[in-house]
Amino acid sequence: MPRVNQTKLCWSVIVKIGEDTIHEGDYISLRDVAEDLNLTYQQVADISVGRKKFNSKFKYQPKVEIKKKSLVNL
């Protein structure tokens, strides 16, 4: 379902590998985040509420942070 006149950037995303930030951006919706990061909507929704953790021993595993903008700006 398309968004109706929604232009407010509501989600802040940071993707890091170690201390290096490889992607940072603000998005209108979680669906936009999913499309940009090439993840499913469900994966992005899980990450945004803290249900999805990437617990891997792989040396270069990215850390993905998705936060609601209203919570970031407090």
Image (tube, grey):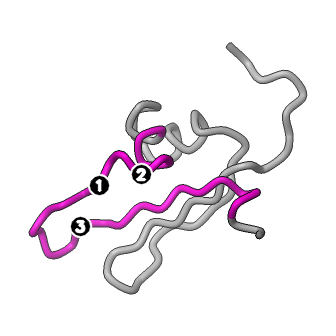
Instruction: Give whichever of discs 2 and 3 has the lower sequence position.
Output: 2
Residue type, mark 3 in image = Gln
Local secondary structure at mark 1 = loop
Say whether residue 70 is magenta.
yes
Quarter-wise, where is residue 73 in the image?
A: bottom right
Closest to the observer, 67 or 29: 67
Q: What residue would you read off at disc 1?
A: 53
Q: What residue would you read off at disc 2?
A: 50
In magenta, the rendered stretch is 45-71
Distance from Cα at disc 2 to Cα at disc 3: 17 Å
Q: Residues within 10 Å of mark 3 (few under 14, many from 20)?
A: few
Q: Residue furthest bottom?
A: 19
Local secondary structure at mark 2 = loop
Distance from Cα at disc 2 to Cα at disc 1: 7 Å
Q: What residue would you read off at disc 3?
A: 61
Total count of labels: 3
Q: Residue furthest left?
A: 57
Closest to the observer, 53 or 27: 53
